[in-house]
Image (spheres, coloured by chain):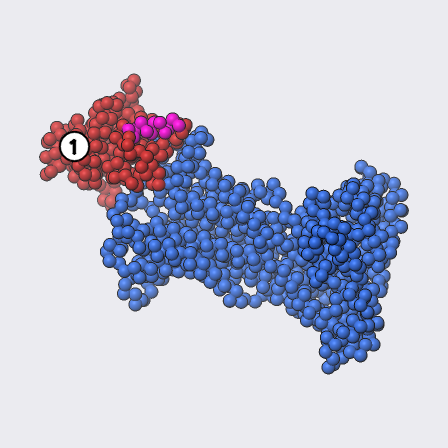
Amino acid sequence: MIPLSSLLRFAVIEWSSARLRTVFTLLAGVMGVGIICAMLISMTSISAGAREIMTSIAGTAQLQLTARSADGVDERLVTRIRAVPGVVTAAPLLEQRATIRYGDRRVGVQLVGVTAAVGDLDGITSGPLLTGLLSVPQLFLPRAVADAAGVPDRGEPVVRVETRGLTHAVAVSDVLDEPVLGPLAAAHIAGTPLARAQAWAGLPHRVSRILVRAAPGQEAAVRTHLERLAGDALQVGTVDDELALLRRASAPNDQATGLFAAIGLLVGLLLSWMAAALTLPERRRAIIAHAEHGLPRSRIAQTILFPALLLGLISGALGVGAGVLLTHAAAHDAPGYLAFAWPLSSSQPLTPAIVAASIAAGVLISVLAAALPLLELRGDPVRRALEADHDPGETIAPTLQKRFSGLSVVAIAAAAIIAIAAPSLTVLAVVLLALGTLALIPALFCAMLAIVAAWPRRDREGVSLEAVRELRSTGVRAVALCATAAIAVFGAVAVDGARMNLLNGLYEDYEQYTASGDIWITGHGDDLALQPLLLRSDQLADLPGVATARAYGGGFTDIGDRRVWIQARDAADSPIIPPSQLQRGDLAHASAQLRAGGAITLSRQLADSAGVTVGDPYPLQTPTGRRVYTVAALTTNLGWGPGAIIMPRRDYAEAWQTASPTAIEILTRPGTAPQHVIAEIRDTLGPELAAGVRIQTAAQRNAAANDVARAGLARLRQIAIILVAGAGLALGAALATTIWQRRPTWAARAFHAFPRRLAARLILLEGLLILGTGCLVGALAGLAGHWMLGRWLEATTGYPAPFSIAPVSAAVPCAILLLIALIVTAIPADRAIRAPLKLALEPDN
Amino acid sequence: MTLLLEAVGHDHRDGDQLLHALNDISLTVDRGQLIALVGPSGAGKSTLLSIAAGILVPTRGTVTWIERDGAPIDISALQGREQRWWRRERLGMLVQETRLISGVDAVANVESRLLGSGIRPSAARRRAELLLGDVGLGKRMRVHVQRLSGGERRRVALAQALAADPVLLLADEPTVSLDGDAGRLVLDVLRAQARDHGRAVLMVTHDPAAAAAADHTLTLRDGRLQAEAPPRAAQGSLRS
């Protein structure tokens, strides 16, 4: 082993001798690690934030009983649970989705009603805070909610708490920060005494969840007792079950961000490789020189890899900082749709595991890029150098092209097989496709040069031939640049294409979902219409502008590890099943079955996991027991990841024992303006009731839902743009460096009266050939990746994502990348071709 | 300690044709001697130097290094670890193509050779400065190598070759493309290395002035050693 101090000195010499390469490697690493770190934070923030909230509320409870009905269960059940042998303590909660309104701003929160019993579980941060929470007549708000709603810190501002169609004016006692509230400061929740929450929700003496701590070793026995006690009205499980449900719901989002993390790693690696290629001949010579002096291979490897390792550590550390910035700039919010079912946090935890993984990625990027010249260590490099009739320089040997092409064919074939045979592994297939595309670049780039060289042309000045010659002589770095452009465009086109398909599918689904009414009345912030309202449809049926007013019901029910969305539709709804979402079954027949009752539709993933299909009986656990329905049709997941069920409202009301609608849908009389009917409805409800609900036209409801869908997928688009723009900047800088390095050549050309305009054309042509080939290959491969991801969305996740290609969306990343890279290159290139003539005479080391 | 080549021959193929690059070469280079190997281009000088270094294996004959205690080392049979030991501990090579690290000074270039052998940075720096002083670059050692003249860079490469204190120094065209003064400085260093430091020095050269500086000059023509000539006669051979 070479002593550490000597290795450090080696690193300093290495970095001093190749400052540009060092800076590039550093920047490449920072960019790659930044994307990886941001994606890791994004992937873990949803579950980590939810875990923090759940732990803060549930404390040391191991078990929980969850009401199957949105109206909860009688709170007196808690007393019976406490009497179960082995139960140490039990604490009731009432959790309701609510909005906090301050002025014109509304923030969705999970309203949590608690009692002092939570303190026995060390929950809701316990001790003085819980005492304060239970004794203060007003409301405490976490910092995240106050900031989002614009609630000031001082002066007891009054907010409105809106839930289940009711609204209450409440003074805010205090806004609590992280030192007091811990992780809950970043959570979108509002804690209040149970009785107050019950009053606000119009659910006196009802609770939605009961937390239980069992004595050590008695958990299983207690669970058995609780299951007996719970009957059908409650579901017994562990506290961690909530996280499993959330994980299932956020899985597609996690996989998409995971894919971007893999692409970020590839881009970082390519950029570092490109940086390493800037001094590849020098490194080869250094290795030969070391071998000439008899240095053992292990020591030569140390001299090459140690500086890379150190650089990787530095870029990893800086990349973590970049990742945190990127998280705040582009991926700061958890997808809003998940908040309909779980309390979410805006915290972005930078855990030691994320830091370690990010720095490891930085080291991997740097070391792998630097390791390429170590291939020289095969056999005797001194002898090989002696026998070679010329310096291998940076040309790409045809045998290497063939090998890479062979690898590419294998990788692309494997990707296609995986995508077709095992759609659930499509993310892996897309990564393989990316690798296959990379491996194909050397051959494609050389083929492109051959085409340009052979193309019949009117180029009398021979600029195109000169460009081809230059690019052939610097093949390695040109291919590295081309591959980087390709992979950045690939990622952007593939992921953004799939995102667009999904958005279009969601828009179409929602439009058909709301088409059964001209006007909808729902709770505030309740885009999925899940909360029961204290309204009846017949209150509005006689209004002059109303043709019909129908009740709609909806809610969640947990099936295995899926929190499934139930849409309970009136028999008169048309359409009762969104036609575009039908995957199996006959639309007319299925609609008729639903209208008749006793039948449901299932999203295909639910049916597959239960092993049922159209016509089969499907047992559904309800608050009134297990009921069996006939599967009328299979649908997509209707935009809700874990799956969805459409059932007749009559059956739902009977099984869930609820008469309260979660929305009212109104068809207006022909010729009546919707705004006029909305005004009639407001007048009828009166100011108090009208303030508690949202009355929208179907178009307005669609627009609001589409906003949520767009916001949920916005981070993918933002990351795609950052990826392409970052790659454009890095590629521009790398191109500029290679042009700058060739200043002696430009000076020599100028000495031989080569016109500057031709030099500029030469540079432009080289840049376009490199980046254009990369963009073209990346866009084509990206479209294939787009198809794979679209198929994965439909086949595996069940999302509605009809495949369609928008050539413009493939062209935009190419245009952004080309434009940025060429702008960055322009000034250094102009300076380079004006290099002083004396440079032409300087000796070359 | 002596380098001993006995009846060395080397063949190589050019298509279907077998070419005899070297035939029946025998020579010795002792410690303290500077031997010049002259001859026209294509005579096989560089091939012979590579065989002497153990980089190429001769087709015929033997290449032996006789240690101080008389133990012979068959250089052409060395492989792997032993070959690296030979290159590290005994051999110094000054090749035509200087492989200097640009962007750093002469000291860092010589240091980088020493650091690889496990020497601490401070010791490596001191030794590098000493070696650069020996080759006459005491005042230019802090200058970046790309700002040095061709002759100065050749001397930096020479300091690198001497970094491990080799007993056998092989130099391939040490004065090529250098002007008279620069070439003379390099030759002075080579001569001093042989005489003052007791190294065995074998150089291949086209340069009559270089040949004149040697203790003995050997002429190679068409792969055969013509004669061992005194320096003046060798100059005549080169001119012809």
Position in image of residue B26 (x %, y %): 20, 28
Q: Where, by quadrant of the figure, is residue A676 drawn?
A: bottom right
Label the magenta part by its dominant secondary structure.
helix
Q: Where, by quadrant of the figure, is residue A334 drawn?
A: bottom right
Choose between A331 and A74: the one closer to the eye. A331
Choose between A414 and A376: the one closer to the eye. A376
Is residue B132 shown in magenta?
yes
Quadrant (top left/top right/bottom left/bottom right) for the N terminus of chain B:
top left
Report which residue position mark 1 lands on. Answer: B211
Which residue is depicted at the point 26% across and 55% down?
A: A750
Secondary structure type for disc 1: helix
Type of amino acid at the residue the image marks with label 1: Ala
Q: Say whether residue A196 is visible.
A: yes
Which residue is depicted at the point 80% across and 68% down?
A: A687
Q: Viewed as shown, does residue A23 lie left or right of A529? A: left
Q: Viewed as shown, does residue A607 lie left or right of A194? A: left
Q: Say whether residue A560 is visible.
A: no
Is residue A364 shown in magenta?
no
**Rendering colour (chain B):** red
Q: Residue furthest top?
A: B69
Choose between A231 and B114: the one closer to the eye. B114
Which residue is depicted at the point 79% across and 61% down?
A: A167
Quadrant (top left/top right/bottom left/bottom right) for the C terminus of chain B:
top left
Position in image of residue A771 (x %, y %): 42, 58
Q: For the residue carrying disc 1, how many other residues have a C-alpha within 10 Å: few (<14), some (14-19), or many (20+)? A: many
Position in image of residue A224 (x %, y %): 84, 45
Which residue is depicted at the point 63% across and 66% down?
A: A505
Q: Chain of mark 1?
A: B
| Chain coloured blue | A
Q: Which residues are magenta?
A: B122-133
